[in-house]
Amino acid sequence: MKKRIGLLYGGKSAEHEVSLSTAKAVTQAVDFNEFDVFPIFITLKGEWRVGPQLSEPAQSIEQLQFTTTSEQSENNITQFINAHMENPFDVVFPLLHGTNGEDGTVQGFLEVLNIPYVGNSVLGSAAGMDKVVMKQLFEMANLPQVPYESFIRSEWEREKTAWINKCEKALGYPMFVKPANLGSSVGISKATNAEELEKAVQFALQYDRKIVIEQGIKAREIELAVLGNDTPNVSVAGEIKPMTDFYDYDSKYKDGSTALIIPADLQANVYSDLVDMAKRAFKAIDGAGLVRADFFVTDNNEIFINEVNTMPGFTPVSMYPLLWQHTDLTYPQLVKELINLALERHTEKQQLQYNRD
C-alpha cells in the first residue's frame, strides 16, 4: 500500500524561492509507484494552500504555486489539518528553509498533530537555526570555531561605537557579519573597515534582531553531509570554491559563479577528523534525519566548524544531495531513506509514556 507523503514548501521566509526550487526537485526524485504525493504550499504571507495530489513530477515552480478556490479562506491552515484527519499523511516532508520553517516552528506544529516528519526535531531545528545557540553548543562539545561576537538590535542601537571597537579589538578585519537566524547566505556581508562594518550590521538587522560577527580567516570551505538518527553516516567531503569574494546568495543559487569539488582533495587524517567532528556536531544539536556540516580548513590543516544546516537545499546545484550521489546514494534513494528515518524516529517517540500509571 502506498504511503501518503505531504511535501511542505514555500514559507514566510527570505528563502522562499529556494524552497520552491527544492520542492520541484524533490517531486522529481520521489517514486510515484511507492508514494502518493500531496503538495502543501505556504505563501510569502504565511497562507497555507493544499493542492491536489500529484500524479507526476512537477515540471515548473509555477505548477506548485496554486491559488485558493472560492471555498478556501485566505489562510486555510485548517484545510491541511482536516485533510490529515480525514486521511492521515504517513509522513510530511518539510522543504522549508530559514525562519518559519527550519527553525522549529513547523516542527512543533507537526509534533502537536502527532504527524511523522522528515528531519530534525523542534530542539535540533531551533538550535541549528540560531547561530549563537549553535556556537554555544559547539563550545560545549569542544568543537573548534573561529572567534566571534554577537549582540541584539537594542544593544547595537545603544552602544554602536563600543561594539565596533570591541569587534575590531577581539576579531580584526576582515569580518563576516551575519543574521543569527537565517540560512542560504542571506543577509551576510564582508567588512574590511569600520564604515563597512556598520553598513553590514544595518543590512543584517533587516533579517534578524540578533547578529553574529565572525573573524575572517584564509581557509578552504569544506562541507560534509550527515544522514541518520542515533547512528548517523557521513558522506565524502566536498569543497566550495566561490569565484566571488565569498559564498553569498547569488553565487550559491543564481549566477553559477561557484565551483563544487567532490570529493575534496584532503589528507586521509583530515577527512577522518572532519567525519568525527560532523558526527559530534550532529549529536550536539540532537540531530535527526539530516544536516550538512560546514567547516573551514586552513593551509596547515587546522579545522574549524562553521555551522550545521538542518534543512540543506535539494536543488540540482545543492551540495547535500551531490555529496550523497558521490557516496553511492542516488537522489531517489536519499529521499526514500529520509522518509524511512522520519518514520523510525516517530515510532520511537510513540513508545514514550505520558501518564504515571
Image (tube, helix red, strand yellow):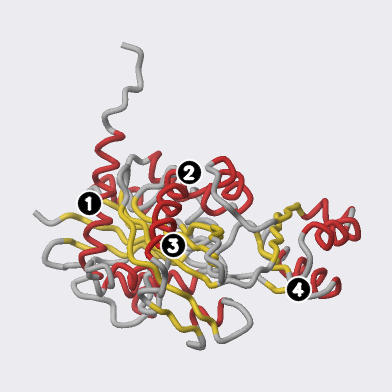
Distance CA(mark 1)–CA(mark 4): 44 Å
Name the amino acid type tagged 2: Ala
The first of marks 2 and 1 along the sequence is 2
Name the amino acid type tagged 1: Asn
The residue beneath circle 4 is 191
The residue beneath circle 1 is 340
The residue beneath circle 2 is 284
Q: Position of residue 214 (x, y in %)?
A: 69, 62
Left or right of 193? Residue 149 is left
The first of marks 3 and 2 along the sequence is 3
Q: Nearer the viewer, mark 1 or mark 3?
A: 3
Q: Position of residue 220 (x, y in %)?
A: 53, 72
| Helix, strand or loop at mark 3 | helix
Distance CA(mark 1)–CA(mark 3): 31 Å
Left or right of 216? Residue 54 is left
Please tell me whether residue 84 is drawn above or below residue 322 in the rendered image.
Answer: above
Q: Nearer the viewer, mark 4 or mark 3?
A: 3
Quadrant assignment for the N terminus: bottom left
Most extreme residue toward the top is 357
Q: Is residue 71 visible?
A: no
| Helix, strand or loop at mark 4 | strand
Please tell me whether residue 126 is drawn above or below residue 274 in the rendered image.
Answer: above
